[in-house]
Amino acid sequence: MSPNDHITNAEPDKTQPPVSALRYDSPADLYANLPQVAQLTLHRPREEETPLGYLHRLRASTTPEEAVTFTAFAAMPKMGVWWGYECLRLSGYELSGPDRELIELVANWTQYSDNENRYRTMKAALFAPVRTPAVYLGLAVGWSGGQIAPNDPAGVPPHRAPRALNTAVLSCLARSDIQSRSIRLARFIDQATVLYPAY
């Protein structure tokens, strides 16, 4: 499955422009517009650094988990949730029955990203008895944009979905044993690279 599998065209017979997977063209712009990412990372992007270049620098740093945090904030919500879904799938993380149902709702939302599916996923996540990686991924869907609730016109703050996505992926990583954690982190970052333009 690739992120493009979740991009639907309104007119399938006509060529559509590529859909950007990232919120901003540069990491510096991301940090300027979503300052919450700076609260969760030690490293800062350089002024002319490309998104992929910054991702590689974070990966090679003493805190490579920051590459996960950067991706969670850098990716457009739908693309970020797709990436989080793939991370959970790649991790071999054992899903409980409720988590399996929630992950199915998440996968459905990546295919059909309407408010009805978003609210359904958010409700399941909010009422989950335990905050698992799958639940945080469901919250990332719920907070991906639009009104915060059907009867509440307030918009969702833009940092809430990336924070939930970051927690979903990092908490999934934290469930790994020490020996396999670095391998799993490398897989998550490898999976993230498809979201970044290669320049």
Image: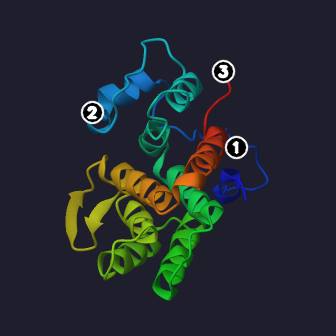
The residue mark sitting in front, 1 or 3, is 3
Residue 67, position in %: x, y? 49, 37
Q: Secondary structure at mark 1?
A: loop
Q: Earlier in the sequence, mark 1 or mark 3?
A: 1
Residue at the farthest front position: 179
What kind of residue is marked 2? Pro
Which residue is painted at 62% across and 67% down in the image?
92
Residue under pointer 2: 35
Q: Quadrant of the image for the C terminus?
A: top right
> How far separated are the C-alphas under marks 3 and 2?
24 Å
Look at the picture and state if 93 lies above or below 20: below
Q: Is residue 11 left or right of residue 73?
A: right
Residue under pointer 1: 16
**Closer to the camera, 111 or 129?**
129
Q: Is residue 19 left or right of residue 24?
A: right
Q: Earlier in the sequence, mark 3 or mark 2?
A: 2
Answer yes or no: do the residues labelled 1 and 2 have beta carbons within 8 Å? Answer: no
Residue 112, position in %: x, y? 57, 68
**Closer to the camera, 117 or 80?**
80
What kind of residue is marked 1? Gln
Q: Secondary structure at mark 3?
A: loop
Answer yes or no: do the residues labelled 3 and 2 have beta carbons within 8 Å? Answer: no
Look at the picture and state if 55 lies above or below 192: above
Which residue is painted at 28% across and 73% down in the image?
150
Q: Secondary structure at mark 2?
A: loop
Which residue is painted at 58% across and 70% down in the image?
107
Residue 146, position in %: x, y? 34, 58
Look at the picture and state if 181 lies above or below 95: above
Residue 35, position in %: x, y? 27, 33
> Which label sits on residue 199?
3
Q: Quadrant of the image for the N terminus?
A: bottom right
Disc 2 residue crowd, few under 14, some 14–19, many 20+, Cα 10 Å:
few
